[in-house]
């Protein structure tokens, strides 16, 4: 127990102070105070981001955790707003992760345009709830308009179609969600329900549940097919929807980490012959989380059409590439999807957290309609009748405003920069003999690994599969340590994952993963990140005894077998 600090006289919770918190500041002085706080947020944080070019303070998490163990809620106020803001700027921000740093190239979270902070503040100030018209009014119709704009970006249907649906209260072109996970779950929810039309003794899977639905349709098993690069949110969907996440089947990928069409086709044919198995959906990935790879969407769409299977495209990452005139072609075939996931907080550069899901058929969402007595009554236009989430903020207002401020061309420039800088990075990796590029960037994501000189020789000359695996095992540990040390030093950041390595028996290897989306990340920064990794490698070779064993493999020994 720490001794209670002496509380200043004006720090008390009473009606007087409470009222002041809720009432609009009328006098000049209190207005100025509020504006001053906003300045502190905008510039205090901004200065922080500018002065700390690195990624985070080099302080171990365990040390931090020890400062966050007090579990009591104070009865009386502890701090004033100004103090709280100051503490956040001084103590939290430097120990959080500066995702805005151009040296932070490891994840799909990055710098956002400055105006996003203003737009987010507006959404908070208006505090609309899109669950129903009664708490959102114009925001609900604006949301329908934004949804139609995005639907048009994906499906590009005729003008008549959008005139008919843009403000149609009975139909729905898509939804805003909390993120890609909820978007994927919603898409598979719709796909699952579509498999269970009513029969004489069965109403719907929503009402009667999975056991009754399976029985009514004489099914024993339902599956979803996606490549092994599929995002784990699809597994969650399998669990939640009663499909079972082991029935979200990972199909092998080819050397480009795209779904293997021959294997997928054979699997679909085999499963379709089984009377009591139903394929609820096939998922194509447009920008895999780990590699950025894009599945052959046109062929997948064709296969789905032939077998009347719901085709979902997970474009959580890659969706905004459609705005780039140069690279939109990479997503060809997406317009044939029955449903499409796109995240707002990824390549639309919106603050956490918002995603979207779109449906080709404006009636598709009828399969998950829910009504309640007090809101979302039958026949209402409340958007909450077709969403997994209940209360929901006006993310659509932020996206719409951002599209107005940026124009599609503004987004296109950022997309193009990401893709082209990733290609530059790939070349830099190839040019350095202590690194090996593992996956070429299709979009702005690539993977590579450090391969110190002696290991490179081993890899180049080893014929034996077991020897190769052993070498890769050592390299795995080196890359794990390299990534950890770089993260802990806190100057720059790449992430790491495991990927199938297409040599010999295709075993998994540890790779470093880089996602390039910060417009300030350029060639010289990438050079410095690689320089830092080389420096770390140098210290590792000298200091870490577990490596010396591996590195000292006598010359010639690797020739055997
Ligand atoms: C990020 C991502 C998701 C999950 O989205 P969240 O917004 O993190 O819930 C799903 N699929 C892909 C391909 C992603 O990159």
Image (spheres, rainbow, N blue to C red):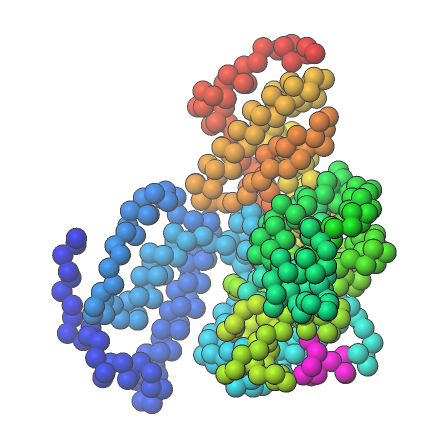
Measured as percent of width and height from the top left, residue 261 is found at 81, 45
Measured as percent of width and height from the top left, residue 120 is found at 50, 72
In which quadrant of this rendering is ligand 1 seen? bottom right
> Which of the 4 image quadrants contains residue 508?
top right
| Residue 497 as seen in the image, left or right of residue 195 | left
| Residue 277 as seen in the image, left or right of residue 540 | right
Which of the two residues, 256 or 512, is positioned nearer the viewer here? Answer: 256
Q: Residue at x 77, y 83 (%)?
A: 163
- Number of labelled discs? 0
Quadrant location, the C terminus: top right
Q: Residue at x 51, y 37 (%)?
A: 483
> Which of the 4 image quadrants contains residue 111?
bottom right
Magenta run includes residue 89:
no
Which of the two residues, 396 or 419, is positioned nearer the viewer here? Answer: 396
Measured as percent of width and height from the top left, residue 465 is found at 69, 20
Say whether residue 517 is visible: no
Measured as percent of width and height from the top left, residue 294 is found at 73, 50
> Which of the 4 image quadrants contains residue 169?
bottom right
Q: Residue at x 50, y 73 (%)?
A: 391
Magenta span main SS: loop
Q: Residue at x 48, y 81 (%)?
A: 126
Compared with 27, 211 (above or below) is: above
Say whether residue 454 is visible: yes
Q: Which residues are magenta?
A: 162-172
Residue at far bottom of view: 26
């Amino acid at each position: 127990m720490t001794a209670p600090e002496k509380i200043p006289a004006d720090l008390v919770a009473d009606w007087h102070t409470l009222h002041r918190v809720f009432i609009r500041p009328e006098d000049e002085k209190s207005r100025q105070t509020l504006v001053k706080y906003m300045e502190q947020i905008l510039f205090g944080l901004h200065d922080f981001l500018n002065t700390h070019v690195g990624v985070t303070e080099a302080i171990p998490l365990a040390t931090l955790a020890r400062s966050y163990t007090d579990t009591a809620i104070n009865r009386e106020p502890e701090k004033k707003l100004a103090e709280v803001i100051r503490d956040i700027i001084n103590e939290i921000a430097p120990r959080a992760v500066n995702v805005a740093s151009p040296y932070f190239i490891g994840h799909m979270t990055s710098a956002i345009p400055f105006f996003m902070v203003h737009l987010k503040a507006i959404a908070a100030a208006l505090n609309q709830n899109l669950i129903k018209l009664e708490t959102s009014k114009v925001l609900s119709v604006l949301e329908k308009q934004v949804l139609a704009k995005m639907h048009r970006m994906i499906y590009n249907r005729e003008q008549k179609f959008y005139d008919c649906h843009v403000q149609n209260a009975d139909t729905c072109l898509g939804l805003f969600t909390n993120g890609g996970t909820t978007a994927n779950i919603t898409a598979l929810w719709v796909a699952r329900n579509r498999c269970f039309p009513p029969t004489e003794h069965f109403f719907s899977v929503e009402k009667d549940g999975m056991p009754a639905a399976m029985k009514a349709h004489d099914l024993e098993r339902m599956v979803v097919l996606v490549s092994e690069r599929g995002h784990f949110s699809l597994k969650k969907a399998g669990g939640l929807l009663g499909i079972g996440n082991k029935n979200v089947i990972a199909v092998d990928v080819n050397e480009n980490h795209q779904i293997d069409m021959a294997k997928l086709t054979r699997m679909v044919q085999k499963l379709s012959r089984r009377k009591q198995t139903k394929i609820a959906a096939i998922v194509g990935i447009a920008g895999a989380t780990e590699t950025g790879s894009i599945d052959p969407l046109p062929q997948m769409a064709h296969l789905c059409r032939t077998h009347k299977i719901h085709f979902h495209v997970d474009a959580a990452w890659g969706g905004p590439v459609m705005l780039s005139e140069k690279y939109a072609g990479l997503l060809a075939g997406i317009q044939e999807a029955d449903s499409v996931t796109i995240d707002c907080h990824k390549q639309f550069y919106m603050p956490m957290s918002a995603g979207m899901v779109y449906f080709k058929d404006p009636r598709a969402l009828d399969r998950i309609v829910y009504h309640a007595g007090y809101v979302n009554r039958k026949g209402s236009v409340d958007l909450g009748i077709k969403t997994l989430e209940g209360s929901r903020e006006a993310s659509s207002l932020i996206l719409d405003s951002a599209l107005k401020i940026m124009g599609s061309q503004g987004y296109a420039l950022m997309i193009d920069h990401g893709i082209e800088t990733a290609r530059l990075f790939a070349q830099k990796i190839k040019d350095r003999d202590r690194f090996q590029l593992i996956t070429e960037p299709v979009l702005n994501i690539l993977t590579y690994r450090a391969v110190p000189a002696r290991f490179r020789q081993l890899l180049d000359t080893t014929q034996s599969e077991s020897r190769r695996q052993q070498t890769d095992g050592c390299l795995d540990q080196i890359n794990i340590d390299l990534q950890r040390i770089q993260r802990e030093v806190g100057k720059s950041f790449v992430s790491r994952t495991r990927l199938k390595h297409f040599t010999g028996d295709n075993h998994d290897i540890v790779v470093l993963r880089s996602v390039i989306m910060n417009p300030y990340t350029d060639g010289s920064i990438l050079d410095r990140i690689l320089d830092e990794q080389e420096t770390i490698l140098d210290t590792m070779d000298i200091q870490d005894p577990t490596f010396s064993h591996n590195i000292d493999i006598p010359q010639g020994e690797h020739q055997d077998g």
